[in-house]
Image: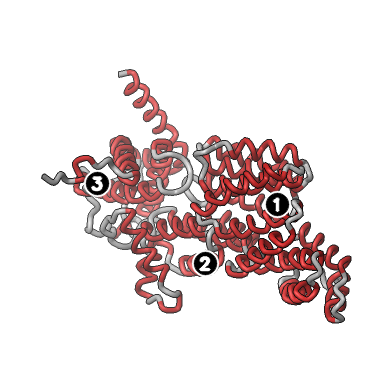
Amino acid sequence: MEISDDLDATPSAEDVFELEVEKVFQETLGLIHIALVTHYQLSEQEATELEKDLFVWFRRFCYRPGASVRENRPYLLVACCQFAREYQKYVVGTGVRESDEKLRSILDREPSDVAHDFSRSLQLFDFRRSDA
Amino acid sequence: MISRAAFSFSISDVPMPETAKILQFRTRQSAPMRSRAQVLEDVSAYLAIPAAERSDRLTESMLTDGDSLSAICTILWDTINVDPAMVDDEAPRLYRQLFARPAGELFFDERDYFLGEFALLAGGSSRHLGRREDSEAWFDRADASFRHTVAPASHLARVSYNRLALRYDMRRFSDVIELLPSTALTFEKLGMRLEVAKCGFLQALSHKELGEFEEAANRLQLLSQDREMEAGLRGSVLMNLGDVQTTRGNLQEAVLAYQEAQPALMQAKRLAALADLKAIFGSTLLAMGRRSDAIQAFREAVDDHIALGMVTRAAYLRLVLASALLAVGNAREAEWQIQAALPTIDDQKMVPEGYAAVALLRESVRQRKTDPKALLELRNYLQTRN
């Protein structure tokens, strides 16, 4: 009887890598969504579209030389805040959307600072998870 | 393979809302996701087509897809030590083609990142081929592009490492020894093991060039014990360890190091390093008194460097070969080797204009009475300057 190789096949290095990228992204997605919708005031549709782009970007970002996938997570948040800010600045600047005090305040802040605050939430999340 | 459908979200074919079509965002639909292996295969097929025969449409499909650009970079980095001339041909063209394209075709910081990668590849390949001024200009471009990426530290450190490698080529070894630890520390903090090892290697080579052979041997010995090191780098470490051992008179240890270096370099397809190994082994054979074997090793090293397009290195090795030929009384072939080297020495400006030893050597060869002093002076000059 022939037994399929697939049954015993161990995942390739590429598969392990891709799974890790997906896992890290999924773990961060909740925070990304909060950043986009609650803080940068994107609509749900806009946030969903940006999240798709962020995933494609993050996957390729992890192929760049440098840190491990998990260590790249703060950069995902920096990118999220940076691009959300650019997007909202453009939308507000063209008059498509009106700005309020809360939005103006976050658009005035450096995206890396905003991301840093979010990273603290992430560290807290990691701490709780390791504690569990 | 991982099923792409396993995502809780899918990569949509729906275009972004009109409001999203701004400079930093993609201005096209997401391409369907392909496995990395598939992309590498497609890109290898693209690169196998001669540049002049590539259709504009195919090139555009490569330049507007981040997965393809990422795979092109991977292939070119794998090739740079094996076939620098190929990378030297591709990377500048890719840089210019990408630079000329609209900014919104790639995601977020990717345009800057890939421009940085192609510039760094172009600079690295120019350095391998001995064109230092070109290298500096390309490293400046890499630096300028990487600065605009989301996480520039590792990439700027890579540029910094390449600049130091260039300083090594320019024989500014004290600069390298002084500045390298800072770059190595950045790599260490980022967990980039291969780059840390490369820094250690460059530092050891700088000690070797400064005549600090014991320090160099200790560092190289330590590096060579890392069996998990990338094969090409380990081969280069062992090759240089052999060279240092030759200088210290430990000829048997040198041969043992070369024996270990060769399979590692072959495994990594490091053709340039294998060509250098032949030249270095030739010097060890000379030290052992095996002159005809040494001459054969130098001949092969010259041929290999020519085949790799490394003309300046080949010209220098022709002079090394000529010296060995003169020492065994083969003046005719020595003259021929010198005559073959001189045009490259002139064309590539390997010596200052009017350099006396070149004129003396040219004249002595013309008279079929090779001047060994002029030959030795020119060899020494090229060894220290090139």
Looking at the rendered structure, the secondary structure element under dot 2 is: helix
> What residue is pinned by disc 3?
B2
Which amino acid, by three-letter code, is at mark 1?
Answer: Tyr
Query: Mark 3 belongs to which subunit?
Result: B
Taking the view exactly as shown, the residue that stands out farthest to the bottom is B366
Q: Which numbered tag is attached to residue B168?
A: 1
Residue at 71% x, 42% y is: B177
Percent coordinates x, y for residue A3 in the rendering = 15, 44
Task: Specify whether B150 is left or right of B353.
Answer: left
Q: Are marks 3 and 2 on the same chain?
A: yes
The relative height of residue A51 versus residue B118 in the rendered view (above or below) is: above
**Res B184 quadrant in image:** top right
Q: Give how far across and how far down residue B334 sits, in percent.
A: 77, 72
What's the distance in space between the residues labelled 3 and 2, CA to CA? Answer: 34 Å
Looking at the picture, does residue B353 appear above or below residue B75? below
Residue B301 quadrant: bottom right
**Dot 2 falls on which chain?**
B
Neighbour class for label 1 at 10 Å: few (<14), some, many (≥20)? Answer: many
At a point 38% along the width and 50% down the height, the residue shown is A60
| Alpha carbon distance from label 2 to label 1 | 23 Å
Q: How is the image coloured?
A: secondary structure
The answer to whether marks 2 and 1 mark residues whose Cβ atoms lie closer than 8 Å is no
Mark 3 lies on a secondary structure that is: loop
Query: Label for residue B86?
Result: 2
Where, by quadrant of the figure, is residue A129 drawn? top left
Q: In this orientation, does residue A33 appear?
A: no
Q: Which label belongs to residue B180?
A: none
**Circle 2: residue type:** Met
What is the x, y in percent for residue B385? Answer: 77, 59
